[in-house]
Amino acid sequence: MSTEPDVVLAIDIGDAKFAAGVMTMKGELLDRDDVDIDHGKKADVLFDSLTEIVQAQLERARTHHNARPVAVGVGCVGPAQPDVVAVSPATVGAWRDFPLRSKLAAVTGLPVYGDLGAKALALAEGWLGAAQGRDSFVAIVVSTTIEGGIVLNGQLLDGATGNAGHIGHVVVEPNGRRCTCGSRGCLEAEASGPAIAAITGRSPSEPTYEIMQRTGRLVGRAVASVCNLLDVDVAVVGGPIALGFGATFFNSAQETLDEHAKLSFSRGARVIPARLGDRGPLIGAGAVGLRGLRRAARAV
């Protein structure tokens, strides 16, 4: 019998990077690597760049960490089919109905389990982060896109097609900017990185005080809708926009949430920063892998 500890290969398909890492069964990230997404490349070329870091992490797991990879967990920007059988990430234009699961299974020889990146983050923050010990909360990623994951009564919501949680398409500015989804005034069309750049003419990495406040207010408005609808009292918010804007963003989001969450059960709901930082997406992907392994074991 092997004495090597089991580990999960975690993969995050993000807004600007592919990342891969080795995670223990207790959520410790032992190793990681990433590569920029070259948006000018074709689908298979992009997958080849992902394959390079995946194979490097598998090798390091075995030779450097003396561990045995037993599954692959994936967190991916949406939209995506369940278990990332096919993905069409909004930030990876070359991937349309891309068969990510089968390709990763062929490369790794391991079972592959996947979910949306924000849903993966919800698993991570509920397991080891800011929502630890909570049965109901929403996790939100504010970045190039805006996505969410909702946990109710201890269960991560999937929805009819696995895409539950797309808070970025809650309308926060009626008759606002046109969104990529075809609607107007969606949170993503008003508060994502590209939206901020289009509105202000400057990079979201160099925001004004007013844009940090406005972004927080819009997120707070969307969070209030979720809290009022689903009886959720905590929103854990991550992503480079939210965390980069810091206290100004979170104070504005909380003030707006307080203004609009007035029901007896939603009054007092809070917006708090994600705790796991840049480890969150990979730990979340690893958590998706662990969940997949548990479900497979129960099905036997």
Image (cartoon, rainbow, N blue to C red):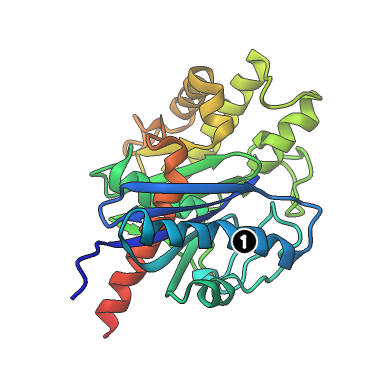
The amino acid pointed to by label 1 is Pro
Taking the spot 76% from the left edge, 40% from the top edge, the residue there is 175
| Depicted 136 relative to depicted 58: above or below | above
Camera-side residue of 279 and 220: 279
Residue 179 x, y percent position in the rendering: 75, 47
Q: Tell me, yes or no, if residue 74 can be seen here.
A: yes
Taking the spot 66% from the left edge, 64% from the top edge, the residue there is 47
Relative to residue 236, is residue 95 drawn left or right? right
Taking the spot 66% from the left edge, 25% from the top edge, the residue there is 205
- Quarter of the figure with residue 128: top left
Binning the other alpha carbons within 10 Å of mark 1 as few (below 14), some (14 to 19) or many (20 upward) gives many
Residue 33 x, y percent position in the rendering: 52, 48
Residue 55 x, y percent position in the rendering: 52, 63
Taking the spot 63% from the left edge, 74% from the top edge, the residue there is 99
Please, which residue is most extreme toward the bottom here?
Answer: 300
Mark 1: which secondary structure?
loop
Question: Circle 1 is placed at which residue position?
Answer: 79
